[in-house]
Structure formats: structure tokens, C-alpha cells
Image (cartoon, helix red, strand yellow):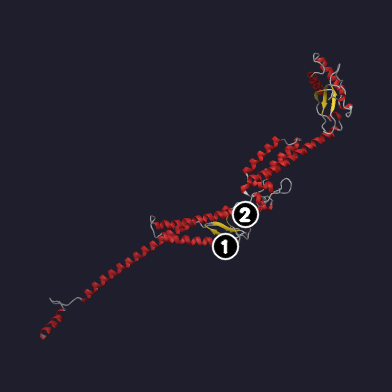
């Protein structure tokens, strides 16, 4: 057995382990294996490079997609001229919203457009964008309205019709005013602790100059007419005012509070002025006071016209009396107790006596003379009356002197001379 093992060992040594003889090509075998290993390693390296490039491409694609979303973010809000405290509130809002937007943009790329999660993150980004747009528009409106309010205040155009609103506006537009930003809306807190969304705020109304001018023109018209205000005129003016105030309730409050006509407000409280439930009652109070003023203007115009006529007539006695009316007076009515036709002259001045002039001639009729002892004869031109009477008798010989037709023609001719 031992000899057999020796024989096998010698054989292995002689043949290199090859049964048919010869030595094993160790170098060749190892080289082939190394070549195969190198090929594998090269292939693996190439595969890794390919994977890296693919992942890099994917990352770039995702970054590009996210950048596209971020570029769509509408966060450009102009803070020019905004006080520091207000800038801080707006910038804090913008930063918070940007964070929400970017987080959603990073998540949305993980899902296909048909995935509900995709829509969830798309909604977040749209909501943020809408809040940015809203904030920009709100700030633009706020700055413009603030400028308008300050200008109106400095030029005395603001109405006192709602002092509460006027005070609130002063607080909101103060450079020291602060607010929070919610979904792009500015939320103020006034001195009374009331929260106010600026979206719902309207500047105080200006004084109702146009309405006040219309009322002043009406008063001026009735004043110039020289006549007292009639019931028809008063009713017409009331309807005009009701229409104007129904169209613009702020004009109603302004007329009551801003002292256009007297320099002082009407005696109406702020509570009454701004009680929406009793607006009709307020309207009646204001219109009644306006009509009282217009009626006073009419009375003033009438009185001034009468005074002017009296001053002018004092230098011309024939103009102290209105155009005469023809009347038949009984013996009890006629001055001197003689019945007949008389020209009755009413004085412009109600305190002056009435003048009676007898018309016609013949039996039983008074002659053309002044029959009132308190009126001078030269108040009526007797020569003119005689000429008129002669003219009518010659032109209308069939008319009976003293008849109504004769008297009418006589007075018409007299007044034309």
C-alpha cells in the first residue's frame, strides 16, 4: 500500500497531475481567470457609472421639476414705503408660506399626476400662490386708500356722519398700526379690541358737497322768486330729497352732521345718524329741517321784494297800488254810501289803505273821484281816467256806462295809457 502511494506521488510529480502525462499550465489557467475577473470588474464599474449617471439625471430632472414649481410661486410683494412693523408682519407671512410651498413642491414630484397625493400637494401650492396674490393686492389697496384718506382728512373733505368709522380709519391708517396676515388678508385690532378684516373695510364717506349744492340752489331759486313757499313746491322738494337720500344714505348723514348751511350740525346724535333700523325716521327729521330752512329763504325773498317795492313806490305814488280790480259796491259797501262801479286799488303795503275810484257817469252813479279820505287824489291820474272814459264812449257808443263790459274796457284802456 505504501509502495502504491509512492508510485502515485512519483507519477503526479512526473506528469504534473495530468493522467496522460505532461505538466499543468498554471500560469495560463490563472491568467484566464484573471482576465475573466477583470472583465467582470470592468463591466461592474461601467454598470455603476451608468447607474450613477442615471441617478444624477433623475436628480437633475427632479430638481428641474421642483425649480419649475418654485418659479411659479408668486411671492413678489412690494414692501416699498411700508413701516417696519408692518413689513415684519408681511415678511413673516411670506416666509411661512414659502416654506409650505417648497415642502409641497418637494413631495409632489414623488407622485404621478393621477395620484390623490399629487392633487393634495398641488392644492397646497395653489393655496399658497393665491394667498401671495391676495396679500399683494391687499397691500396695494391699503397703501392707495391710506394716501386717499390722509389727503381727504388734510383737506377737510371727510364727513362727520359716522365718527366711529372716521376714528377707526385713523387708527388703521396710522404708521404705527399693526396687523396680522391670514391667507393674504390683513387683520387689524382697533382700540376697542374689535378685529377687522381689511377686506371688509371701507373708508369714511366724504362730505356730500353735490347734494348740499343742489339744496342750496333750490333755496336760492325760491328766494329769488320773491314768493312764499307753496304746499306744492314743498311736496315736490320733499320728493326730490327723498330720492337723493334713498340713493345715497351717506349724503343724508353728511347733510345732518357737516353743517353746510348754518355752520353747525343738526341736533341729531351719532346713534341716530347710524341706526340703520330707523333710517326712515332720520330721513324725515333731516328733510323737515331742510324744508324749514328753504321756507325761511322764500319768506326772506318775499319780504325783501315787498320792501323794495315800498321803497320804490314811496317816490312814485302811482306805483303804491296794484293794478285795480273793477267791483260793484252797494251803498253800504261804497265809500260815501253811494252804490256803483268802482276801481278798487289794493296797496302793495298791506298796512296802507285801499283806494276806491268811482267809474262811469250819469244819474245815480258817482263821478270819477277818489272817495277814500285817507288817500291823496294824486294817487290816481284823473286826467288819464277821463281820457280813457271818453275813448271808450266814442269807440263803443252802444255800451252802457257803468256796465261790467264798459268798466272792463275802461280799466284796460286806463292802464295802457
Q: Position of residue 244 (x, y in %)?
A: 64, 42
Q: Residue furthest top?
A: 398
Task: Determine the CA span between mark 1 and mark 2.
Answer: 19 Å
Q: Mark 1 and mark 2 in contact? Answer it, CB < 8 Å.
A: no
Side of 73 where 369 appears, left or right: right
Q: Position of residue 256 (x, y in %)?
A: 69, 47
* 302 in relation to 105, above or below: above
* 165 in relation to 41, above or below: above
Q: Nearer the viewer, residue 101 or 53?
A: 101
* 264 in relation to 91, above or below: above
Q: Quadrant of residue 104?
A: bottom left
Earlier along the polypeptide chain: callout 1 or callout 2?
A: 1
Residue 200 visible in the picture:
yes
Q: What SS does tag 2 mark?
A: helix
Q: Position of residue 32 (x, y in %)?
A: 23, 72
Q: Position of residue 268 (x, y in %)?
A: 69, 49
In which quadrant will I find the N terminus?
bottom left
Residue hosting label 1: 88
Q: Nearer the viewer, residue 183 or 362?
A: 362
Q: Quadrant of residue 57?
A: bottom left
Residue hosting label 2: 146
Amino acid at each position: 500500500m505504501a509502495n502504491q502511494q509512492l508510485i502515485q506521488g512519483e507519477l503526479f510529480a512526473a506528469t504534473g497531475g495530468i493522467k496522460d502525462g505532461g505538466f499543468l499550465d498554471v500560469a495560463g489557467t490563472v491568467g484566464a481567470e484573471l482576465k475573466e475577473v477583470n472583465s467582470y470588474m470592468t463591466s461592474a464599474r461601467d454598470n455603476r457609472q451608468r447607474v450613477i449617471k442615471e441617478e444624477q439625471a433623475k436628480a437633475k430632472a427632479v430638481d428641474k421639476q421642483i425649480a419649475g414649481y418654485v418659479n411659479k410661486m408668486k411671492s413678489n410683494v412690494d414692501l416699498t414705503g411700508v413701516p417696519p412693523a408692518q413689513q415684519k408682519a408681511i415678511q413673516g407671512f411670506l416666509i411661512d408660506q414659502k416654506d409650505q410651498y417648497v415642502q409641497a413642491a418637494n413631495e409632489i414630484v414623488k407622485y404621478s399626476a393621477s395620484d390623490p397625493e399629487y392633487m393634495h400637494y398641488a392644492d397646497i401650492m395653489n393655496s399658497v400662490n393665491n394667498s401671495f396674490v391676495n396679500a399683494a393686492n391687499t397691500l396695494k389697496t391699503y397703501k392707495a386708500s391710506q394716501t386717499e384718506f390722509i389727503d381727504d382728512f388734510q383737506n377737510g373733505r371727510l364727513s362727520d356722519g359716522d365718527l366711529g368709522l372716521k376714528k377707526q380709519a385713523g387708527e388703521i391708517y396710522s404708521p404705527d398700526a399693526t396687523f396680522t396676515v391670514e391667507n393674504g388678508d390683513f387683520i387689524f385690532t382697533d382700540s376697542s379690541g374689535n378685529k377687522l378684516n381689511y377686506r371688509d373695510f371701507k373708508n369714511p364717506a366724504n362730505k356730500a358737497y353735490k347734494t348740499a349744492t343742489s339744496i342750496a340752489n333750490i333755496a336760492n331759486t325760491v328766494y329769488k322768486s320773491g314768493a312764499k313757499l307753496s304746499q306744492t313746491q314743498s311736496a315736490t322738494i320733499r320728493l326730490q330729497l327723498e330720492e337723493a337720500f334713498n340713493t345715497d344714505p351717506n349724503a343724508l348723514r353728511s347733510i345732518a352732521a357737516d353743517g353746510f348751511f348754518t355752520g353747525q350740525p343738526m341736533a341729531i346724535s351719532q346713534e341716530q345718524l347710524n341706526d340703520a333700523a330707523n333710517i326712515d325716521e332720520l330721513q324725515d327729521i333731516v328733510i323737515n329741517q331742510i324744508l324749514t330752512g328753504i321756507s325761511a329763504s322764500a319768506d326772506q325773498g318775499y319780504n325783501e321784494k315787498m320792501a323794495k317795492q315800498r321803497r320804490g313806490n314811496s317816490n312814485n305814488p302811482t306805483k303804491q297800488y296794484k293794478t285795480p280790480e273793477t267791483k260793484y259796491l252797494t251803498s253800504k259797501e261804497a265809500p260815501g254810501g253811494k252804490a256803483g262801479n268802482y276801481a278798487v286799488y289794493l296797496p302793495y303795503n298791506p298796512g296802507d289803505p285801499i283806494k276806491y275810484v268811482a267809474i262811469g257817469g250819469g244819474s245815480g252813479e258817482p263821478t270819477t273821484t277818489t272817495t277814500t279820505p285817507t288817500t291823496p287824489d294824486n294817487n290816481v291820474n284823473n286826467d288819464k281816467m277821463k281820457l280813457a272814459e271818453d275813448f271808450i264812449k266814442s269807440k263803443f257808443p252802444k255800451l252802457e256806462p257803468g256796465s261790467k263790459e264798459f268798466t272792463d274796457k275802461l280799466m284796460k284802456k286806463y292802464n295802457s295809457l
